[in-house]
Image: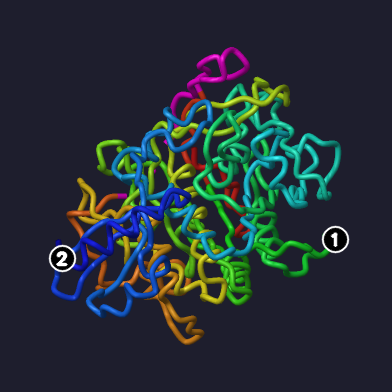
Amino acid sequence: MSMRFLILALAASFAANLSANYIVKYKDGSSETSIANPTTSFASFSISGDIEYVEEDRRLFAHYGEYNDTYYSNQWYFNNYLSNSFYHAREYALADGGPNVTVAIIDTGITSHFELNQNVVGGYDMISDGANSRDGGGRDSDPSDEGDFGDNSGTCSAGSSSSTWHGTHIAGIVAARSDNNYGIVGAAKGINLLPVRVLGACGGLTSDIADAVRWAAGGSVRGAGQNPNPAKVINMSLGARGSCSRYMQESIDFAKSQGAVVVVATGNSNADATFYTPANCRGVLRVGAVNQSRSRSTYSNFGSIVDIAAPGDGILSTVNSGQTTPSTESFASMNGTSMAAGFISATAAMIYQANPGLYPDQVRQIITQTAVSYYCDKESCSKGAVDPYEAVSLAYNTTPNANFSYKDPVLVGGTAALNDGFSSGNKSGGACGTIEDVSGGQGGNGTLVGLFFIMAVVIFHRYKFTKQL
């Protein structure tokens, strides 16, 4: 018997109280396994000098079923083309004790939900029109969603006959609690949610939305108190057809100067995203949608200005069961670039958890640089579909650089640049559709959300914005 086998046998005989297994790699290229670490169990072992290294022989498991949440198996995007990328990313991002990151959800507000309540940090209602806000007044510190149903009152006949709870749905995509034997799994964990209400039954005004962006990033807005929880990521799953407002652009520029990434859904009209705002504002991360077949979602806006795509079809998340006004918490599936934007916001937040010192342009670059290809049926869709694990991995190895500049395909004023360097033809790009109730009788009743075609009402460069279902 060779000396190495004798030593391993001796090591094994002393390993009754040790639970770990080890791989012993020798300098001659051979290897053995041991149920004890011979370098620590036997001083004489290291004297032999023929070991290259010893490492733990870890036990690995199949990824399916990692979570015990009730509807986890219904979340295809955690077990499909992403190959558990979100699962690994959310664990890896916090591996070194990364900080909680605040994500602002600029949307319809939020409703009480067990999956979200622990993560909510403040918020604001930025709707200036009391009739549109349905809470009896103008702006205030309560971001609760009062319902965005259209009541055909004459004040606003737009929208659906039932409320969508759109902001609550986006919040769940980003940060629903996991491993709690209930509900769903959010794309990221360790996230603070900052709901800012800007959309009512009549959509929202540019002035309100731009003020919400500024306030969420820590800026001053007249009449609103200082935000004590500035966001590192700002999600806007909303839009309208039109050019980028100068007032909106100024707020986006401010948010970026404060170190925040602004994520925007490109829209659900199966059209060129260049004509939709705020997706055509400079400095934002523009998101299209892909489906379960790793192809562009048929409704998703497309074009050379789209930066990245993410899952947008059949996305299960948190909602409320009320048909018009809030009732009990529930879960439902929706389709849209809105949902895709939620996944990108979660990815950006995980990047900041992994490396808090990075700058917004670096985050945009990391997300697009690590993207995977997907089928695009248009001349250009995006730089690819998000791969969150690869993005987080790259973030760990990226040195913060204040001078780095992301190659933005949009010029000042919302005009698409020519020869922007975007590839086309092999990438992909997120509409409204049905809501499927999976709450076990609590909610949605398979209610048809209806189509929210993006309509712009221009009054002195103020647009009515609608959510991007």
Q: Secondary structure at mark 2?
A: loop
Expressed as whole percent of the image width and height from the top left, the position of residue 298 reads: 30, 38
Neighbourhood count class around disc 2 (C-alpha, 10 Å): few under 14, some 14–19, many 20 upward: few
Q: Is residue 406 left or right of residue 130?
A: left
Q: Residue at x 60, y 43 (%)?
A: 171
Dominant SS of magenta comes to loop
- Residue 169 in sight in this render: yes
Query: Nearer the viewer's eye, disc 1 or disc 2?
Result: 2
Taking the magenta stretch, the answer to whether it contains residue 439 is yes
Q: Amino acid at mark 1?
A: Gly
**Magenta region includes residue 244:** no
Disc 2 marks a residue whose amino acid type is Ser
- The range drawn in magenta is 429-448
Secondary structure at badge 1 equals loop
| Residue located 59% across and 33% down the image | 318
Q: Is residue 123 above or below residue 324?
A: below
- Which residue is under mark 1? 223
Q: Quadrant of residue 445?
A: top right
* Residue 422 coordinates in the image, percent (x, y): 26, 66
Front residue of 246 and 304: 304
Tag shown at residue 141: none
Compare residues 329 and 254 and report the one nearer the observer: 329
Q: Give the residue displayed 75% in from the left and 51% down from the top.
A: 123
Q: Residues within 10 Å of mark 1 (few under 14, many from 20)?
A: few
Tell me which residue sits at (33%, 52%) in the image.
Answer: 272
- Tell me which label, 1 or 2, sits earlier in the chain: 2
In the image, taking residue 339 as reference, residue 331 lies left or right, namely right
Provide the residue designation for mark 2: 2
Left or right: 128 as drawn, with respect to 365: right
- Furthest residue in direction bottom, as rendered: 403
Place of residue 196 in the rendered image (x, y in percent of width and height, measured from the top left) = 70, 50
Which quarter of the rendered picture does the N terminus lie within? bottom left
